[in-house]
């Protein structure tokens, strides 16, 4: 599993790992660092994200990220939006009402996140992509439920804000399997998570 989104939150980060307020909508002092619409970097990013969505078997979200995506993607045109609408979506939340899950086929996972995601991975052997939900991603990484990390690194050091990775109880080794430039300024890194033998 891995982590994207519409405006960079989640798996897109500054060079120092900050993921907070990429489009500036949160109003943070250092927000707005994500490549602007129409820029060559943004256009190249969209190509990568669309291809990834086409290969996905399902999407996994926390409640806030699901609501954010649903409010922006439900009526968008285009192949990427069509694919996101049609994919099965799973939301880890103990507070989300069933009638709030309106963005295409959506299932709310109400139990323990680790138990629910473990069962989901057994049920759906294809690729489950985590969009934007960095807190959920951190919890899944801690519990060894992440198989692969795909990260966009933006050419900016923000210096302060929420980081993509949080504390872990032990080191989490990863193996770089791909590194490439996307557009003119973005680094796209793919890591497999190394399991202890």
Image (cartoon, rainbow, N blue to C red):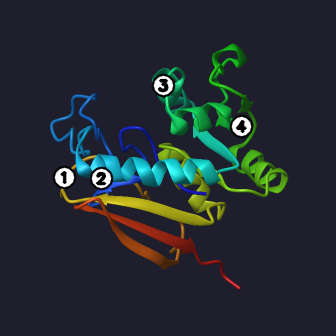
Dot placed on the residue nearer the N-terminal end, 2 or 3? 2
| Number of other residues with Cα within 10 Å of mark 1, as a class: few under 14, some 14 to 19, many 20 or more | some
* Residue at point 55%, 56% (across, down): 2
User: In percent of the image, x 65 and y 65: which residue is there?
Assistant: 144
Nearer the observer: mark 2 or 3; the answer is 3
Label 2 sits on a secondary structure element that is: loop
Whichever of labels 3 and 4 marks the residue nearer the N terminus, that label is 3
Q: Quadrant of the C terminus?
A: bottom right
Quadrant in the rendering for residue 189: bottom left
**Residue behind mark 2:** 18
Q: Residues within 10 Å of mark 2 (few under 14, many from 20)?
A: many
* Residue at x 63%, y 43% (from the top left corner): 59
Q: Residue 111's quadrant in the figure?
A: top right
CA separation, marks 3 and 4? 17 Å
Q: Position of residue 163 (x, y in %)?
A: 35, 53
Q: Nearer the viewer, residue 14 or 49?
A: 49
Quarter-of-image position of residue 155: bottom left
The total number of labels drawn is 4
Mark 3 secondary-structure assignment: loop
Q: CA distance from mark 2 to mark 3?
A: 28 Å
Q: Is residue 162 at all visible to an observer of this figure?
A: no
Q: Are marks 2 and 1 in contact (CB under 8 Å)?
A: yes
Considering depth in this image, is 39 or 154 the residue closer to the camera?
39
From what the image shows, is residue 60 above or below residue 103?
below
Q: Which mark is residue 84?
A: none
Residue of label 1: 158
Mark identifier at residue 76: 3
User: Do labels 2 and 3 touch, CB within 8 Å?
Assistant: no
Q: Residues within 10 Å of mark 3 (few under 14, many from 20)?
A: few
Checking the image for residue 88, the label placed there is 4
- In the image, residue 154 sits, relative to residue 96, either above or below, namely below
């Amino acid at each position: 599993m891995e982590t994207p989104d519409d405006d960079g939150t989640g798996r897109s980060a500054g060079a120092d790992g900050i993921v907070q307020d990429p489009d500036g909508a949160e109003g943070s002092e250092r927000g707005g660092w994500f490549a602007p619409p129409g820029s060559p970097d943004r256009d190249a990013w969209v190509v990568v994200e669309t291809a990834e969505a086409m290969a996905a078997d399902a999407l996994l979200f926390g409640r806030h990220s699901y609501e954010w995506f649903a409010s922006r993607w439900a009526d968008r045109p285009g192949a990427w939006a069509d694919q996101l609408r049609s994919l099965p979506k799973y939301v880890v939340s103990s507070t989300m009402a069933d009638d709030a899950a309106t963005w295409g086929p959506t299932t709310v996972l109400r139990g323990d996140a680790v138990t629910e995601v473990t069962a989901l991975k057994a049920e759906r052997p294809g690729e489950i992509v985590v969009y934007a939900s960095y807190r959920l991603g951190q919890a899944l990484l801690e519990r060894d439920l992440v198989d692969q990390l795909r990260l966009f690194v933006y050419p900016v050091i923000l210096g302060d804000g929420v980081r993509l990775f949080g504390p872990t109880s032990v080191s989490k080794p990863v193996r770089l399997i791909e590194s490439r430039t996307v557009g003119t300024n973005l680094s796209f890194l793919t890591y497999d998570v190394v399991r202890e033998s």
